[in-house]
Amino acid sequence: MTIGDLGSRSVDLTNCDREPIHIPGSIQPFGFLITVGADWMIQRAANTEAYFGIEPLGLLGRPLAELFLPHSMKSLRGRASHLRGDDAVERIFSLRLLEGGRTFDVAIHFSDRSIVIECEPARGDEIEISSLVRSMVTRVQRADSIQSILREGARQVRLLTGFDRVMVYRFAPGGSGEVVAEALEPGIDSFLGLNFPASDIPQQARTLYVRNVFRIIADVDDVPCPIEPREDGEPLDLSLSLFRSVSPIHVEYLKNMGVRASLSISIIIGGKLWGLFACHHYSPRLPSFAERSAAELFGQMFSLLVESRLNAEITAYEDKARKVADRLMAAAAQDSDRLSDAQWMGDLVLDAIPADGVGVFVDDRLSLSGLTPNEDQFRALVGSLNRREAGQIFTTSRIGDVLPEARTYAHKAAGLLAIPISRRPRDYVVLFRAERLRSVRWAGSQDKDIEYGPNGPRLTPRKSFEEWSELVSGEAEPFRDSELRVAEALRSTLLEVVLRLTEAASEERRKFAEQQKLLISELNHRVRNILALIRALMGQTSRDAGDVDSFVATLDSRIQALARAHDQLTADQWGPARLEDLIETEGRAYFQPDRQAIRMTGPDVAITPDAFTVMALVMHELVTNAAKYGALSDSGTVHVAWEIDPDGALVIDWREIGGPAVMPPKRRGFGTTVIETSIPHELGGEAKTFYKMAGFEARFVLPERYIASSRERDEQTKKIAAPSKGDGDFVRGKKVLLVEDSALIAMDAEDSLREMGAADVVLAASNGVAAKALDAGGIELAVLDFNLGRENSMPTAERLMEAGIPFLFASGYGGEGTIPERFADVPMIVKPYGTDQMQQAIAELAARAAGSE
């Protein structure tokens, strides 16, 4: 950053924090930018000549409607009217802007009073964003810990974007950060566990990461395109821009690392920047607009998932702490002298807040236990605490920064958490943590150099990223936010005990008033916290959800139900789908090996697509309610029977048997509303519910027009059984090569193979990567996508056949003539396929392998 215009200010790291990166005055050249006012007259433009032959200055002052087609103007105006909030961005895919011209992907947002329109050429390889993101989120949800969530998140982002290195970068309270998870292209150096100084990401960049959660730098060697006119009053704020050009300092930083392209996705927790997906590529790379949109949406869903999991862990921890507070209240109420016993206090409190020592100071008496300062040092420390704000807990991981003489005993008490237990600043419970000598691994020296040139002094990014270690001393493990909340709860408990036990009888009335005031203050504090949480959740949860977890679970289950219905319709070429398959699919989620939970009786009935999704939601809510409150929550069963009445309508009877007694709900939730009103309102049918003591019952009637076919069958009753595993022995324990150029299909196929028992699945998107996998050895089975975009998998198939390794083809074309005659005996799966189709193909492959022996 050139800082000759900063006058006499010193050159230090804060200069980077003052760099106006949100108003660079230029954009990256992979698209063009136009801004218009409320009258849709062009105010500013950049890089337009490269796309439709008119220089930016030649567009200024002209109506945008003279340039763009009428239907595209209508789309732009419509999306602009949908913008809500300061940071809203609307997107339009494959919009034809000019007569006879190419299509563009468009992003539109407000910048002050201007409408900013950013356009880039559409790739023509649109992806189904919602399905892709749902699949990615589902895989992350399966992770059983925060660390595994982070690892899986990095893996999913890399599969989507194709970047060489994808890191999950978590910020520390001081602003530095650590790479806590990563996914790498083979041969790329690992940054896992390395720390980066806070100065690597200036403060104004962190602010932009919260406002604009996605950032792409396609090529650090690109020449920025200026926004014309270059001098016209206030510069254009590009905080929300997709094309915003890159700070020269950041370009130099990336070049010093050898990186040619980068991508970042913010991880926002509680409205604050918790971390980043930081992606590096060693050659220019620009994922498509749709892929970038999917990555951004995944980042937002990932943030919610991480926040939900963190909140769940905090809730469980605080539940445990509340029990400690209850025990403390009960014990101290019986014997007030225990409050001044550090040994007793430590035995109780340290179960909730880990520490190495405890000091108690009550009525000028002190007690110490564990690793603590001596009595004189502790009294001096209490005197220092008394000079701070009264009634507030205080924590530091370096006592020496607060009280210099404390550095002499940092080896046994380097950090503290002080809990005031009286209204006046005199009585405390103090938890101590000993010094934690640790070696921090940094990605290169944190220093930046000052260079002098024609424009004065210039602060340059560091050039070395070689790992080096720093020994940190005089510092303790910081107390976490959740531990501080527990300390606040303990403070309230101890305050209540002190107020109850230490006041004289003559001051009973004053004590009562103080206690009331304290309790009201604490209640107000807690209520405000609850209201703040509810206010935050209102935007993300349904009316029935009580917290983020239940919202995510309920929303996910309902989306999954619709997705399963969509999958069934898709499998039937969006034609009528079988009712039995719908019930069986929903019921399998609650299948238990030791009993048959759901029994079905009725003819083979197919339902039209416009009614099928409605029925999917209804059946999902019925199964979910039965699992939560009805027969499936106990040892009961559900009987579903259907028949065609004389009028041709489909009559479905749902009956729960052997479960707990049921009562009508006291309020109508979303699930009840779906069950009782969806079919009458949307399909013109009937829905009746009966809350009988013996079990819940319901009857639904679908008009004849929604029944595509009905035929009797020999077997009238079917029980939901465990899914067929096919010939799993042929896959179990094997190392399988999966050649597939679509990340989404590859992930699904990998899951299927692992479900069938594959010991390892090696993914390859091209023949070249497949060849490396075969060279490494150990491949025992292969699944090959025949068409790999610019090539087919014939070279890999030839090599597998020569090596005698069994394999099968997958193809999206189907029909005869797709696979060469040489491979006519190789089984083929036609896309789209699932686990069942994979199992059938594997079974066929196993049979052929057995027949050839």
Image: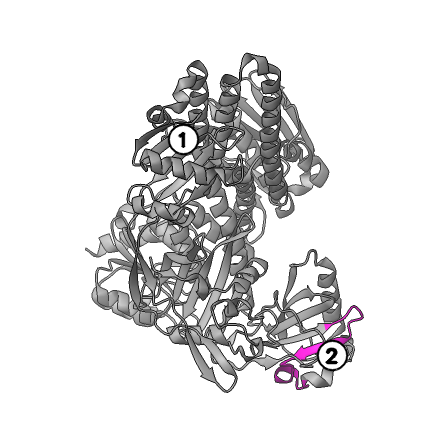
Look at the picture and state if 305 lies above or below 463: above
Q: Residue at x 32, y 52 (%)?
A: 842
Q: Is residue 27 left or right of residue 58?
A: left
x%, y% of residue 213?
55, 59
Return the residue at label 2. 67
Compare residues 418 and 225 and report the one nearer the observer: 418
| Magenta stretch: includes residue 450 | no
Give the residue furthest to the top.
505
Which amino acid lies under the numbered mark 2 shown in the image of this protein? Leu
- Mark 2 and mark 1: span between their CA atoms? 63 Å
**Residue 422 visible in the current orientation:** yes
Which amino acid lies under the numbered mark 1 shown in the image of this protein? Gln
Compare residues 544 and 371 and report the one nearer the observer: 371
CB under 8 Å between discs 2 and 1: no
Query: In the rendering, which numbered label is found on residue 592?
Result: 1
Give the residue furthest to the right.
39
The secondary structure type at the circle numbered 2 is: loop
x%, y% of residue 656?
53, 23
Q: In the image, which residues are magenta?
A: 36-55
Crowd around label 2: few <14 · some 14–19 · many ≥20 (10 Å): some
Q: Is residue 386 left or right of residue 400?
A: right
The secondary structure type at the circle numbered 1 is: loop
The number of callouts visible is: 2
> First in sequence: mark 2 or mark 1?
2
| Magenta stretch: includes residue 51 | yes
Compare residues 728 and 540 and report the one nearer the observer: 540
**Residue 615 visible in the current orientation:** no
x%, y% of residue 584?
49, 37
Q: Residue at x 22, y 65 (%)?
A: 776
Foreground label between 2 and 1: 2
